[in-house]
Amino acid sequence: MTSGDATLTFAPGSLPADAYVSITLTTVLLPGTTHSVLAYDLLAIDVTTGAKIEQFNSPPVLTVAGATPGSQIFYVPPTGALVPITTSYHGTAVSAGLPHFSTYVVAPPPLFQDVTVRLDNSSIVLVEDGVPVSVSL
């Protein structure tokens, strides 16, 4: 199934029951930033019982086209702290086997670097991931 740039693929027998499956496009604010990114809210409902299907016999695969090199798929838990999912990159798409259905985003690594600016005496220092990268006087 496809929605926007996202495609969800199931291996034969991965769903434990017949299901209605949806991909709802939404946006989420990345933690610690003012950047909103497109998110994919995934849901599977058992056709017979109406219950959410939360466990799969094998992981469904989410593939998102249009990704930049180094992008990764992240799970967005209710706390908002993004959880990285093992992701593979193919040309301009990223793919990941999902542990469960929930909300997921694709984001490039630079959005998650730890960048600070500090004042050392009369110098301004940009620090990226704990390493000073520039100094101005």
Image (spheres, rainbow, N blue to C red):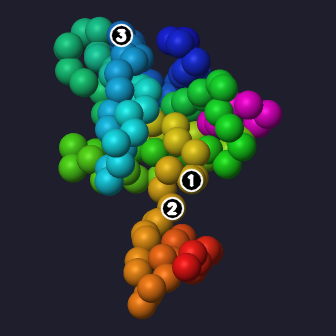
Residue 12's spot in the image, x, y percent? 59, 22
Q: Which residue is mark 3?
A: 20
Residue at the bottom extreme, as displayed: 121
Measured in 3D between alpha carbons, the distance from the residue under mark 2 to the one under mark 1, in whole angstroms, is: 5 Å
Q: Residues within 10 Å of mark 3 (few under 14, many from 20)?
A: few
Q: Residue at x 74, y 31 (%)?
A: 92
Of 17 and 43, nearer the camera is 43
| Three-letter amino acid code at the position of disc 3 | Tyr
Q: Are marks 2 and 1 in contact (CB under 8 Å)?
A: yes
* Residue 92 on the magenta segment: yes
Give the spatial CA distance, label 1 vs label 3: 36 Å
Q: Nearer the viewer, residue 115 or 136?
A: 136
Viewer-side label of 1, 3: 1
Residue at figure coordinates x 60%, y 27% from the top left: 64
Task: Please state if 31 lies on the left or on the right of 95 as rendered.
Answer: left
Q: Which residues are magenta?
A: 90-95
- In the image, residue 61 lies at what x, y percent? 56, 32
Residue carrying label 2: 113
Magenta part mainly helix, strand or loop? strand
| N-terminal label among 3 and 2 | 3
Q: Toward the viewer: 37 or 4?
A: 37
Q: Quadrant of the C terminus?
A: bottom right
Q: Nearer the viewer, mark 3 or mark 2?
A: 2
Please state which of residues 33 and 19 is positioned toward the viewer in this rendering: 33
Q: Assign a secondary structure to mark 3.
A: strand
The residue identified by callout 1 is 110
Q: Amino acid at mark 1?
A: Pro
Residue 23 inside the magenta-drawn segment = no
Q: Specify whether residue 86 is in view.
A: no
